[in-house]
Image (cartoon, coloured by chain):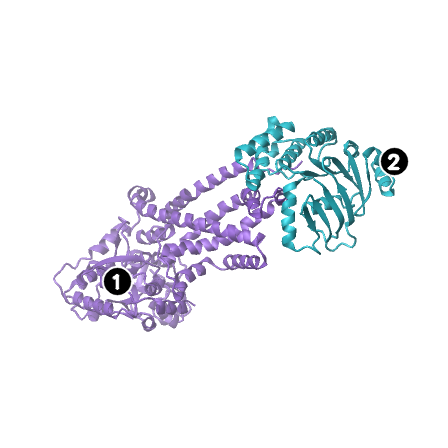
């Protein structure tokens, strides 16, 4: 599925500077993209605007044939309808996972398919078990989130999103809530999902995640300042903001 | 306000012709105690008293069956206006202002007011003039209380029962008691430490009251009283209860010494024997309390049914109000907040009074049980709403966002994600609320329901036993409340295991 973002503009209520200031890019299906940028550059805000958790004033997002336009041009019913369609195609893995603590791993993965898509319970469960098994959680299917390690919780969160069969899966800082020693595990998971053909957009502060991606975007002050293959962008950055970001990380 | 309510209720009351049938429903309060209408201390499952005998005799003469209906004594005329019974018959004193709201029959009994003081108390008041500034106990709304007010006494009125009034005098909390002769005879005279003061302190006359539209019923009651007076039935009845006196003989126009029947006050003797000197606790536990079990069991059933149904209503109201307050559009939020503030901020007693005595003004006449459930349910609904709101607010916003991103509707998120997590937070205060409701349900005795507390007060008064019966009723309350507390703790534990926040 093609994702086209055009001139996105967002200013938080009461803030002087916009957090997204004409963000534009295009994405063709089937890749693993890392979105980099210093704190406050608008990465997380972009994800939240894209999935409809936060409004944006101007610009538009086209996900396949669905177009979500800013609040200044689109009436609320049009936005609501577009957001519902986008959520049926795009999933999000939260930074703090936001698993449902009263449900088991499998139940976390079947609630939405059963209630939203109307998948029969047995079928939904079968698919959830398959997804969790593929992500290495075959032993933890009936565990509640409080009985899982951080990495396991993240994988349940990923499985929960994948259970809705999204075309695009977004991640908000997937390594930040985990022990540094688990970066490899996260990368491994991302590649496992990549193999299924789902497009992944990973907002990250983590250089190793950026290196493991297929494409890199760098945001600065609410705009896309640089993009390209990770080996190019990370070894010979062209934009001042990228250079500064890499210097800070090293 | 009560006066307004009363008059309004009267205007709205339909002309009830039930008494024309075979049943005469007569309103009384067994809390008032001996010798009027009270539970037999030796077998509290039976209602006895000279007015019980009187009601039966009147009904028999009218070709009907007398059925007593319990109602709070100082509300009898309001309950009558509502149509809860056909005639109020329970030591209702003849007074001009009562004629404005009800039709009164001819008096059926007259008695002097009796001043009782501590025996040998040199400083005790002995005349009406002495009463100025002295602490004197009596019943609220009675002729005695008006006499005391006119005399400038510091009037202490008691809502509990007549026994307490004399106990307080004995214990020195008051200086004297002024009450009708039958009450003094049955309670004051039993205390060796107390004595009557000779003298004229006024005379009280008891009448029956019917609704203003029931002129025919009043005429039949008047006819029955006259007929019972004429053939000596009333004299024999009053003698049996030991309350026959010259004032009543004059009132009924009969010879005070006449009549061929027995002059022995058998019922009064029975009363003295039963409660004159209270047996030790263990003897009461062995001989008397077992017979209170059916009464307490029935009352506990009432308390339990009322509390459970009220709680079900409160939970339903609470869920709706809490959801409206948190998720509704602005007007709904304002309404929900207004609901909570109104029902939380005003006394339950007032709400119950409005539902039971006020709604008839709008044409809504509720059954006492329904009225009790509604008042308790609406009141506790406000507490539940706040409780659930706190529960909902304790669930992190991320849970709603995660639900939304997965495509769950607001309602689905509430039902499958937010609600179950909020329930855990809300469960312990909910148990507290239920136990509180269980206790507050005692207020429904106002609307003629006899539950645990009312049963205790009635029995305490009839058996002159407050401590032992108090322990009994406490056990009954605990027997009802503790299982719920236990269940709630178990449920909480079961929910708890899976509801610790899954933070990394």
- Give residue B18's mark: 1
Q: Position of residue B212 (x, y in %)?
A: 30, 70
**Is residue B281 shown left or right of residue A25?**
left
As rendered, which of B259 and B411 lies closer to the eye? B411
Same chain for labels 2 and 1? Say yes or no: no
At a point 49% along the width and 37% down the height, the residue shown is B490
Q: Chain of mark 1?
A: B
- Give residue A84's mark: none
Q: B38 above or below A199?
A: below
Which chain does the cyan colour mark?
A
Which chain does the purple colour mark?
B
Query: Which residue reaches farthest left?
Result: B260
Callouts 2 and 1 close, C-beta under 8 Å: no
**SS label for mark 1:** helix
Q: Is residue B273 visible?
A: yes
Q: Label 1: few (<14), some or many (≥20) within 10 Å? A: some
**SS label for mark 2:** loop
The quadrant where residue A180 appears: top right
Q: Position of residue B393 (x, y in %)?
A: 60, 48
As rendered, which of B4 and B405 lies closer to the eye? B405
Q: Position of residue B78 (x, y in %)?
A: 35, 65
**Is residue B95 shown left or right of residue B478?**
left
- Residue assigned mark 2: A236
Q: Chain of mark 2?
A: A
At a point 66% along the width and 56% down the height, the residue shown is A75
């Amino acid at each position: 599925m093609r994702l086209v973002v055009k001139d996105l503009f967002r200013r938080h209520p009461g803030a002087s500077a916009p957090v997204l200031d004409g963000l534009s890019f295009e994405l063709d299906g089937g890749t693993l993209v890392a979105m980099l940028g210093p704190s406050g550059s608008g990465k997380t805000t972009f994800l939240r605007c894209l999935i409809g958790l936060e409004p944006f004033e101007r610009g538009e997002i086209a996900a396949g044939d669905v177009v979500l336009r800013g609040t200044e041009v689109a009436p609320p019913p049009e936005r609501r309808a577009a957001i519902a369609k986008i959520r049926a195609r795009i999933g999000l893995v939260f930074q703090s996972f936001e698993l449902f603590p009263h449900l088991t791993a499998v139940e976390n993965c079947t609630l939405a398919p059963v209630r939203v898509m109307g998948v029969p319970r047995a079928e939904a469960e079968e698919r959830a078990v398959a997804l969790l098994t593929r992500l290495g959680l075959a032993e933890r299917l009936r565990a509640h989130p409080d009985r899982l390690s951080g990495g396991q919780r993240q994988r349940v969160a990923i499985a929960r999103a994948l259970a809705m069969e999204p075309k695009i899966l977004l991640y908000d800082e997937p390594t930040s809530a985990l022990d540094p020693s688990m970066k490899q595990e996260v990368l491994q998971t991302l590649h496992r999902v990549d193999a299924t053909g789902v497009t992944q957009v990973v907002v990250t502060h983590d250089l190793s995640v950026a290196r493991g991606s297929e494409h890199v975007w760098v945001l600065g002050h609410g705009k896309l300042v640089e993009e390209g293959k990770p080996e190019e962008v990370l070894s010979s950055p062209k934009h001042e903001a990228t250079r500064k970001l890499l210097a800070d990380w090293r | 306000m009560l006066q307004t309510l009363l008059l309004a209720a009267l205007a709205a009351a339909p002309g009830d012709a039930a008494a024309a049938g075979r049943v005469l429903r007569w309103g009384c309060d067994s809390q008032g105690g001996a010798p009027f209408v009270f539970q037999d201390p030796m077998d509290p499952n039976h209602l006895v008293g000279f007015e019980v005998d009187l009601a039966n005799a009147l009904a028999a003469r009218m070709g009907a069956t007398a059925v007593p209906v319990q109602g709070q004594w100082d509300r009898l005329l309001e309950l009558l206006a509502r149509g809860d019974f056909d005639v109020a018959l329970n030591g209702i004193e003849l007074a001009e202002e009562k004629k404005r709201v009800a039709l009164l029959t001819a008096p059926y009994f007259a008695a002097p007011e009796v001043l009782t003081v501590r025996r040998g108390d040199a400083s005790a008041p002995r005349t009406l003039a002495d009463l100025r500034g002295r602490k004197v106990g009596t019943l609220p709304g009675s002729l005695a209380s008006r006499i005391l007010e006119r005399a400038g006494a510091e009037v202490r009125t008691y809502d509990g029962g007549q026994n307490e009034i004399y106990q307080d005098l004995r214990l020195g909390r008051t200086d004297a008691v002024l009450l009708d002769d039958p009450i003094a005879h049955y309670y004051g005279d039993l205390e060796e430490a107390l004595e009557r003061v000779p003298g004229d302190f006024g005379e009280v006359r008891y009448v029956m009251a019917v609704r203003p539209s029931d002129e025919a019923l009043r005429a039949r009651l008047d006819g029955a009283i006259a007929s019972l007076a004429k053939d000596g039935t009333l004299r024999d009845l009053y003698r049996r209860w030991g309350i026959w006196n010259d004032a009543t003989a004059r009132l009924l126009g009969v010879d005070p010494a006449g009549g061929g029947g027995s002059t022995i006050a058998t019922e009064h003797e029975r009363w003295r024997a039963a409660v004159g000197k209270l047996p030790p606790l263990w003897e009461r536990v062995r001989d008397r309390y077992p017979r209170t079990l059916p009464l307490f069991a029935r009352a506990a059933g009432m308390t339990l049914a009322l509390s459970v149904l009220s709680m079900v209503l409160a939970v339903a109201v609470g869920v709706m109000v809490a959801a409206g307050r948190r998720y509704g559009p602005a007007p709904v939020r304002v309404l929900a907040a207004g609901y909570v503030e109104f029902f939380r901020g005003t006394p339950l007693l007032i709400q119950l009074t409005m539902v039971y005595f006020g709604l008839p003004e709008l044409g809504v006449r509720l059954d006492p049980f329904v009225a009790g459930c509604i008042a308790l349910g609406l009141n506790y609904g406000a507490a539940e709403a706040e409780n659930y709101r706190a529960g909902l607010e304790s669930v992190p916003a991320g849970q709603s966002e995660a639900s939304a991103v997965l495509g769950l509707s607001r309602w689905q998120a509430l039902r499958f994600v937010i609600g179950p997590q909020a329930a855990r937070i809300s469960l312990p205060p909910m148990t507290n609320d239920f136990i509180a409701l269980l206790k507050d349900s005692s207020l429904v005795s106002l609307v003629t329901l006899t539950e645990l507390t009312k049963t205790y007060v009635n029995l305490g008064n009839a058996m002159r036993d407050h401590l032992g019966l108090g322990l009994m009723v406490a056990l009954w309350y605990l027997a009802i409340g503790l299982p719920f507390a236990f269940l709630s703790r178990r449920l909480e534990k079961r929910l708890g295991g899976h509801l610790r926040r899954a933070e990394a």
